[in-house]
Image (cartoon, rainbow, N blue to C red):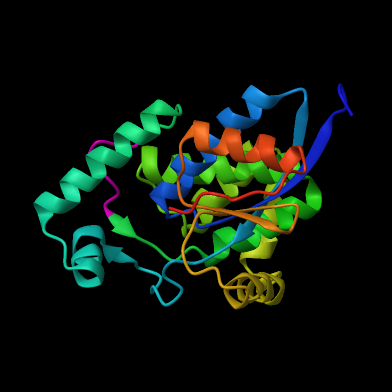
Amino acid sequence: MPGMTSHLKIDFVSDVSCPWCAVGLGSLEAALRRIAPDVTAELHFQPFELNPQMPPEGQDTFEHLSQKYGSTREQQAQSREMIRQRGAEVGFEFSPEGRPRIYNTFDAHRLLHWAELESPARQAALKKLLLKAYFTDRQNPSDHEVLVRLATEAGLDAARAREILASDEFARETRERERMYTDAGIHSVPAIIINDQHLISGGQSVEVFERALRQIAGAQPSTVAAA
């Protein structure tokens, strides 16, 4: 009905070491601002690990990307610049030097799982702080001291965060949730699932997100963009 507000449930499946996830989140949030207050959304961040076998010490970024994709330093620099520009368009700052190493992100996902139980707003705050710490400030998102500090900045309890990180608390729940999304066919991120049925894949533009969200909120049949 005209004048009615639609409310969307959005599951943002992503990794904190995924640059396109930072771009996609910036675009999605900009699109949500454009369609407010007619459409509101509840955002939940779901776990996905790009490198679940990554050892604690991590791996040099150039080495990792050249092994994974066969890319040269020049190709990586071009890709980094393109991502930096896309980030700037949605207000996310990537360090021009790029990230020095790729790290294991499982503990970050365990903290995000706990943060969601505390409050979706605090989970969102922690997610954004993690992305900034890694991509802007070139910090290690597997370092427990970094994680405790970011959790505290997000308004979460430092002692509780430290306790979780020192144990395997929320490991089973996080693994189960990761498996649920890979079993559903999600093998690249970001993957944005709206109302448990519509999928938008990739770091899309603000316009693509806005159009898709309006369409879904209007309950019209939707063909949603894929990267």
Front position in the image: 94 or 43 = 43
Start-end of magenta stretch: 93-100
Q: Is residue 96 left or right of residue 181?
A: left
Q: Is residue 200 left or right of residue 80?
A: right
In this view of the protein, can residue 94 be seen by the observer?
yes
Instruction: Indicate yes or no whether the magenta region holds residue 8.
Output: no
In this view of the protein, can residue 152 be seen by the observer?
no
Front position in the image: 206 or 16 = 206
Is the stretch drawn in magenta largely helix, strand or loop? loop
Report x, y in % for residue 209: 56, 38
Report x, y in % for residue 26: 51, 35
Q: Is residue 105 left or right of residue 222?
A: left
Front position in the image: 102 or 219 = 219
Front position in the image: 178 or 174 = 178
Residue 212 placement: quadrant: top right
Report x, y in % for residue 42: 76, 42
Q: Residue at x 11, y 59 (%)?
A: 72
Report x, y in % for residue 147: 55, 51
Q: Residue at x 45, y 27 (%)?
A: 91
Q: Residue at x 69, y 62 (%)?
A: 163
Q: Which residue is farthest front?
A: 221
Instruction: Indicate yes or no whether the magenta region holds residue 98.
Output: yes
142 versus 95 height, above or below: below
